[in-house]
Image: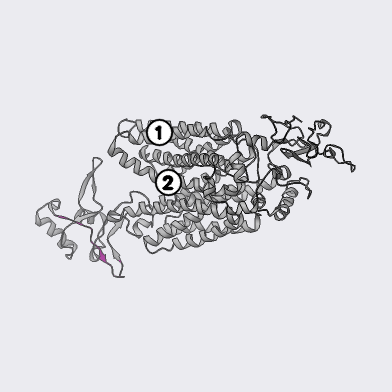
Amino acid sequence: RSDCEKRSDGDYLHSVVNCRKCGVVCSNVKAFNCAVLTFSTSFATKVNMSERKEEPCEDSLLAVIGQNGKWQLTIFLIVSILGIPSAWNMLAITFLAPNNLDHWCAPPNHLQNISVEDWKQLAIPMKMKDGKKVYQQCKMYDLDYTLTESELISSVATSSGDSNTTALIACRTWTRDDGAHQTYDYDLSRFSDTIVNTFDLVCDNKEMVAHAQSSYMVGILLGAVLGGICADWFGRRPTLLIFTVSLLIFGVAASFSQTILVFMALRFLVAFSMMALFTTGFVYILEPVGGKWRAVYGISYEFPFAIGFMSLAAIAYVLNSWRQLELCIILPCAVFVSFYFLIPESPRWLLTRNRENEARTIVEKICARNKREYKATYPLVDQSSTKTDDEASRATLLDLFRTPNLRWRTINFYYNWFVNSFVYYGLSLNSGDLGGDVFINIFIAGAVEVPAYALSIFLLMRSGRRWPLCLTMVVGGAACLGTMIFEKNVYTLDWPIVTFAMIGKFCISASFAIVYVFSAEVYPTVVRTTGVGSSSMCARLGSISAPYISFYGLQVYRYLPVICFGATSILAGLLALLLPETRGKSLPDTIEEGEAFGTPEEKARQVPVDLNGDYKDENAGTNPRGGEFSRL
C-alpha cells in the first residue's frame, strides 16, 4: 500500500498497475501528469520528464535516454557512412572487370609497330555477330609469323588470294624483350588498366571474371553471419574496429595483386570485412532508438549506400586504372578506426551482458547530450525481464531455431531476404541490355534507390512493417513478370522493358530497406546481429542462384524464369503478413522475449506508457499476476 502513497520527501507518487505489496489496483494518477511512468506488468518507477510530449515509451532504457535525440542523431551520422564504401566495393567489379572489353590476338615482337587495323586485316578473321561483321577475339590465321610485315602480306596475297580460307588457330603467346608474355591486345581507349587485361581474363579464362564476382559474394555471405556472431559475442564497438583494420589490410593488398587467384582471395576477405562492418553498424544505430525513429534511422541507413552507388561512377570515370580505383575505395575506410574512440559500446548490448555499471556510465553521457535528467535510481532493465549474462554469452545462431515462434519467423525472414536478392538479380538478368554509357547507367541505377528509400520511410511511418513489405514484394514480382513478358527483340521500342525494369528495381530496393529494419526489430538483442547477418547470408544465396535459374531455366521451359522470379516474390510478400507487427513496440532482448514477441503473452508482459504521463493501451487485457490492467 505504501507504494501507492505520496512519499514524505514530497516526490511524486509511484503508481503501478498492481501494488506489489497488497495487490490493489492504483487509479489515483490523474493529478500527477508531470511524471513519466514506465513499468512492466506489476512494476513501475517515475522518470521525471517535465512536460515533455513524446510517443509512448517502449522499455526502461528508452524511457531514460529518450527514443531519439542529439546523441542518437550524431551516432547515426557517424556510423551510417559505412554504406558509402560498402557500395563502392560491392559494385567495383563493374569497373574492375568491365564487360565486353574488346580484345584480339597480339602480334609478334617484330610486328609490334604495325597499326592495329593493318594487323587485324592481316591476321585476325571476321565473323557475323548481331547481323554485323566483327573481328574474332580469340582466333588468328595460321600463318608464318616469323616473316616480316611485307613478306607476310605477300605470302597471304599469293597463297590463295583470300586469307579467309586459311586455317584458324588460338591466339599465340609471345615473349617480349622484357621477358613478359603477351597473348592478347586490348582496346584501352576508355579504361587504361583492368583486371581483364592485367590477368588476361578472356577466351579460355573468361569464366575467371565470374569466379571473381562469386568469391566476393561468398565473402559477403560469410561476413554477414560470422561478423554478426562476433558482434553479439564480443560487442559492437570492438567488432567495428577489428573488421576496419582487416578491411584496410586486405583492400590495400588486393590493389597490388600479381595473380588473379591472389586477387580473388583478397577480394573475398574484403567482402567478409565490409559486410561484417555494414551489418554491425546497422544493428548499432537501431538499438538506442525507438518508436517511429527506428524506421526512419533504419531506412536512412541505406541512403549512404545509394550515394556510394552513384559516386562510384564518378570515381571510376576519373580513375580508370583498376589498381588506383581499388586503393581509392579502400583508403577512406581508415576513418572508421576513429569509431572506436568516437562511439561507446551499445548500452543495450552491455545490459544483456549484465554489465549495468558500464551501461549506466554511457547512459549518463547520453542523457547529458540529449538534455535529459538522469538519476542512478532510474532502472535501465525492465523488472519482468529474465535476461542474464549467462544466457547472453551462450546465445548462438541455433537459438533462432530452438523455439517455435522464433523458428518460424527466422525461416520467414530467411525466405524474404533470399527472394529480395533473387528477384533483384533476376530482373537485372532478364530485362535486357539497356544500352548507353556504363557510367551513366550505374549513376541512374543508384539514383532510383533514393526515392525508393524515401517511400519506404513514408510507408513504415504510416503503415507499419508487414503491409509495406508485402506491397513492395508483390509489386516487384509483378514487375518481374511484366519484364519477362516484354521480351527483347519482340517489340520495336525498349520502353516496356525499361519501364518494368525500373519499377522492379524501385520496389525491390524499397523492400530490401524494409526487411532490414523489420528483421532487426524482431530478432532479440542477444542474437540480433547474428539474425540479421544470417538473413543477409540467405540474400547472397539468392544473388548467386539467380543467374543459374535465368540461364538453365530457359533450357527447360521458356517461361520457367518468369514463374520462379514472379511467384517467389509474390509468395514472400504474402508470407510477410504472418510476421508480428513491430511498429511502436519494444525491442525484445532475450530469447524468451523474442519467442513471446507479438503474442498474447508478450502483450500481458509489457505495457507501453506515454512519456507525458497518460497510459495508452490499445490491447488492454488480464494481468496474469492478478487483477486487470487499468487505463491510468
Q: In which quarter of the image is the C terminus?
A: top right
| Colour basis | one colour
Name which residue type carries label 2: Leu
Tell me, yes or no, if residue 30 can be seen here: yes
Tell me, yes or no, if residue 444 can be seen here: no
Q: Which mark is residue 566?
A: 1
Q: Residue 197 carries which label?
A: none
Q: Position of residue 416 (x, y in %)?
A: 48, 39
Examine the structure image and report whether residue 127 is included in the region drawn in magenta.
no
Examine the structure image and report whether residue 173 is included in the region drawn in magenta.
yes
Magenta region: 167-180
Q: Position of residue 306 (x, y in %)?
A: 51, 44
Name which residue type carries label 1: Gly
Residue closest to the far right? 8
The secondary structure type at the circle numbered 1 is helix
Residue located beneath label 2 in the image: 541
The secondary structure type at the circle numbered 2 is helix
